[in-house]
Image (spheres, grey):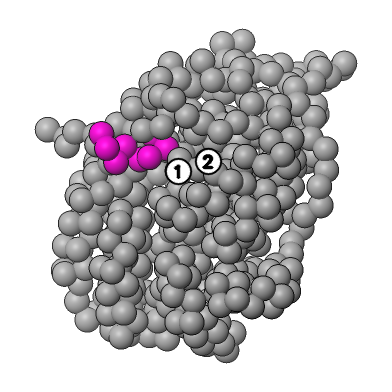
Amino acid sequence: MAIKARENNGSLQKCTRSLAALITMALWPVNAQAQPNFPHAEVKWSGGSGMVEFQTNGDTAELTLLAPDGKRSQLRPVYSVDDALAILADERLSFAWPALLTWAGDDLHILRDSVLAHAERAADGELQPLPVAGRAKLEGFSKRFRVFQQYISALERSGRASDAIAKTQTEIAASTSDDNPILTSQRQIMLAGLLFRNGSTDKAITVFEQASRDAKSNAARQNVNANFALILALTGQYDRALEIDDATEHDFDKSASGFLVGHRKLPDSNAYFTAIRACALKGLGKQDQARATLATITDDADINSYQLSVPAQSRLLALACMHDAAGLATELAAQIQVAPPAGQIFLEMQPARETTPTIRETLIAAVSTDTAIKAVSGRARVLSGMLLPALHSWRDTPAAPSQ
């Protein structure tokens, strides 16, 4: 539930079904064989089943599925520390943990350094950027921007937030009036998010205010204000959050395209506005309205994708922002019970990863409820110990700068 730049048209992240843990299948097609050198186990979940393998090849790794019909597919690539954490939080994948920790480091520092080195070399034009998954594929951002975005993210996730902030400020200062207004606003959103996640809320708000005033297109202003409203809601400025959220959604609904000029609106984008509205209404003491608003965020979850649907993300965000630990526990339980191997929900449920103190406290309370404890049993775990620095993005022990 950490706030993210609105690259996904706002992203920050059902019916309950039983989810079996590891099971043994009686029969497999002759050609359905696991790779002998890779750890593997049979796993079943609501959306599928098969032989799940953790495969490494030099600096790359992935979680794959060999289905009973012999078809092989990727369940989740390991492009980042977050990808590794999701695997480590899924108890059905315990067979893969030793190999993953040997490959990535027992505290994931090897993977962290590899990701940062790749991002730096990509920024220097020596390597291609890492692939982009999910809704981000629809964004249409330039390769140069994707390279920059990945580099800034790798810096922050390596504990070098001050470097990430400085480089983003330099990039913004170098912008010209001829630049794509969407990309200009996106850099400003990145900067505000960096400042907010690293404790400079007032500075983040100042960046948002300036970015909203300076936006050169209506789409760019919508993009900025959608994120601005979220920051305001998360910091308890509910009146202002509600005002900006309502006005921005109204403008968005009138737009022919999405936030990116020439691109269609992405499905379910309005769920983000609804989540912010529910949080603001709850903060203003309008409990019944908040509940009714939250209830309108519905979807049919894709139980075969490790990524969360926009409505699923939005419900988590709304409940956390509303400080509704019981409601959040119920939502977490529902999503965990249908999650595929290494689903994003296993990462979103980690309190130590959350940078907003009030949201972290709500998440701690949620995962401590009987509802959540029963749901995660045999399926998920709250990570701690040697993995805490990774969950904290190494804020206290940053990676050393490249020589």
Q: Residue at x 31, y 79 (%)?
A: 209
Task: Mark 1: give few (<14), some (14-19) or many (20+) Cα within 10 Å.
Answer: many
Q: Position of residue 77 (x, y in %)?
A: 52, 36
| Magenta stretch contains residue 393 | yes
View extreme (front): residue: 285
Residue at the location (18% across, 57% down)?
166
Label 2 with label 1: CB-CB less than 8 Å: yes
Type of the residue with mark 2: Gln
Q: Position of residue 203 (x, y in %)?
A: 25, 68
Q: Amino acid at mark 1?
A: Arg
- Can residue 77 be seen? no
Direction left: furthest residue: 403
**Is 209 drawn above or below residue 4 in the view shown?**
below
Specify the quadrant of the image occupied by residue 143: bottom left
Q: Which quadrant is the C terminus positioned in?
A: top left
Q: Nearer the viewer, residue 192 or 330?
A: 330
Residue drawn at point x = 29 percent, y = 41 percent: 395
**97 part of magenta stretch:** no
Image height of 4 relative to 305, above or below: below
Q: Judging from the image, what secondary structure is the residue with disc 2 in?
A: loop
User: Is 222 above or below relative to 102?
Assistant: below
Q: What residue is shown with label 1?
A: 353
Q: Identify the residue at horizontal 42%, vertical 54% (top origin).
A: 356
Give the left or right position of residue 22, taking residue 247 as reference.
right
Residue 114, percent from left and from top: 32, 31
Furthest toward the top, the residue is 36
Which numbered marker is on residue 350?
A: 2
Compared to 255, does 324 lie above or below? above
Q: Residue furthest right?
A: 26
